[in-house]
Image: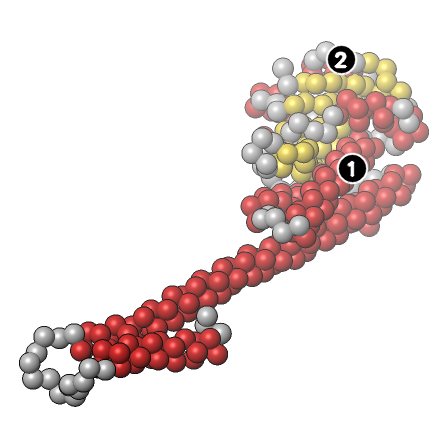
């Protein structure tokens, strides 16, 4: 069974914990009661059972069956449907663990469908039941505590990402390669942004048009508080994205500088090799010319000092080239 917990409340106090959906429907027929039905990854039969029991719109039932939706807030014939994206740490591949929670609110009932590892709705339920006055405000109080928990989870992910970015910045200043880690963190931040950007719009709609969404007066300030926290999370995610962009630019600059230094060093080595090759080429040229075995050659000096003069020309030519290259700092 996908049913995690069913609870029936009267005036903010739990009066029953039915062990099946059918028992919950039976208790609600007595009137003046509110049920919170929590399910994890329900099957089609269970969702259609909820649709028939609470006369839900067929499009709403279809949405309840569909996972991987973007955060949104909709109304179907007086029933409010909210989708909240969740985040809960990082998996073994370094990706954010994403999920979603569907919240369906109607007269006398609240349905939560969790398609994620978080939030822990039992903890959320315990928190709500600990505030009888808040619970007495009706089904909208369930949306508030679930949304508040989801936003708090996002805040913890932001804190973890912030710490990771601090480590990356330390690596950059230490001259260590960080491109792969920066790209990984950038992907997580983008995943977080996709999950959180729509949240302020959802809570703003609830706070500004409470009557349209059936939000009682006593709950409006709570929703504004959640809205403020959601805006803070979105702003911090934007800041983290900017920090990572700057870190990537710095890393690329370091890589480019290292490549330039390597290129300059290689150029210096090539200059030295070329210079020495030219120096040794000068005497080789003289020796090769005068070493040719031809009887009649121009500019032949028949002198006992010819060999010595050739050596002098070789050494002088090499010396002149050495001086030139040294002057130009090639050697």
Q: Is residue 64 visible?
A: no
- Which residue is identified by label 1? 152
Q: Nearer the viewer, residue 23 or 88?
A: 88
Q: Position of residue 224 (x, y in %)?
A: 85, 45
Q: Position of residue 231 (x, y in %)?
A: 78, 49
Q: Position of residue 243 (x, y in %)?
A: 69, 54
Q: Residue furthest front?
A: 304
- Which residue is identified by label 2? 18
Horizontally, is 229 left or right of 174 in the view?
right
Q: Whole-Å distance between the Cαs marked 2 and 1?
A: 30 Å
Residue 283 found in image quarter:
bottom left
Q: Is residue 215 visible?
A: yes
Label 1 near label 2: C-beta < 8 Å?
A: no
Residue 226 found in image quarter:
top right
- Label 1: which secondary element: helix
Q: Position of residue 185 (x, y in %)?
A: 62, 45
Q: Nearer the viewer, residue 161 or 124?
A: 161
Q: Residue at x 58, y 22 (%)?
A: 43
**Above or below, comparing residue 5 to residue 63 in the picture:** above
**Above or below, comparing residue 263 to residue 170 in the picture:** below
- Quadrant for the N terminus in the image: top right
Labels in figure, total = 2
Q: Residue at x 75, y 50 (%)?
A: 236
Q: Residue at x 35, y 80 (%)?
A: 316
Q: Earlier in the sequence, mark 2 or mark 1?
A: 2
Q: Nearer the viewer, residue 18 or 236?
A: 236
Residue 211 found in image quarter:
top right
Query: Few, some or many C-alpha atoms within 10 Å of disc 1 (few <14, some 14-19, many ≥20)?
Result: some
Q: In front of the other: label 2 or label 1? A: 1
């Amino acid at each position: 069974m996908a049913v995690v917990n069913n609870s029936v409340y009267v005036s903010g106090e739990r009066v029953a914990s039915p062990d099946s959906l059918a028992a919950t429907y039976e208790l609600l027929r007595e009137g003046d009661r509110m049920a919170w039905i929590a399910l994890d990854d329900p099957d089609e039969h269970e969702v259609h059972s909820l649709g028939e029991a609470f006369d839900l719109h067929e499009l709403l039932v279809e949405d309840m069956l569909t996972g991987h939706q973007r955060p949104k807030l909709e109304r179907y014939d007086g029933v409010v449907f909210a989708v909240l994206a969740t985040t809960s740490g990082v998996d073994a591949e370094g990706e954010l663990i994403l999920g979603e929670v569907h919240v369906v609110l109607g007269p006398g009932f609240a349905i939560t469908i969790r398609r994620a590892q978080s939030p822990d709705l039992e903890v959320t339920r315990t928190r709500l039941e600990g505030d009888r006055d808040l619970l007495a405000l009706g089904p909208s109080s369930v949306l508030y505590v679930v949304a508040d928990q989801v936003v708090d989870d996002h805040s913890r992910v932001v804190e973890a990402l912030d710490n990771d970015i601090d480590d990356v910045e330390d690596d950059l200043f230490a001259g260590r390669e960080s491109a792969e880690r920066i790209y990984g963190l950038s992907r997580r931040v983008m995943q977080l942004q996709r999950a959180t950007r729509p949240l302020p719009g959802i809570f703003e709609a609830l706070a500004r048009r409470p009557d349209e969404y059936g939000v009682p007066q006593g709950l409006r300030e709570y929703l504004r508080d959640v809205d403020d926290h959601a805006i803070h999370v979105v702003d911090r995610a934007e800041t983290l994205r900017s920090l990572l962009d700057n870190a990537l630019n710095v890393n690329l600059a370091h890589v480019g500088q290292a490549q330039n230094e390597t290129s300059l060093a290689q150029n210096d080595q090539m200059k030295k090799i070329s210079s020495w090759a030219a120096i040794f080429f000068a005497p080789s040229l003289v020796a090769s010319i005068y070493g040719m075995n031809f009887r009649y050659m121009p500019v032949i000096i028949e002198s006992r000092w010819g060999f010595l003069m050739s050596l002098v020309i070789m050494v002088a030519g090499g010396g002149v080239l050495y001086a030139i290259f040294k002057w130009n700092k090639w050697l």
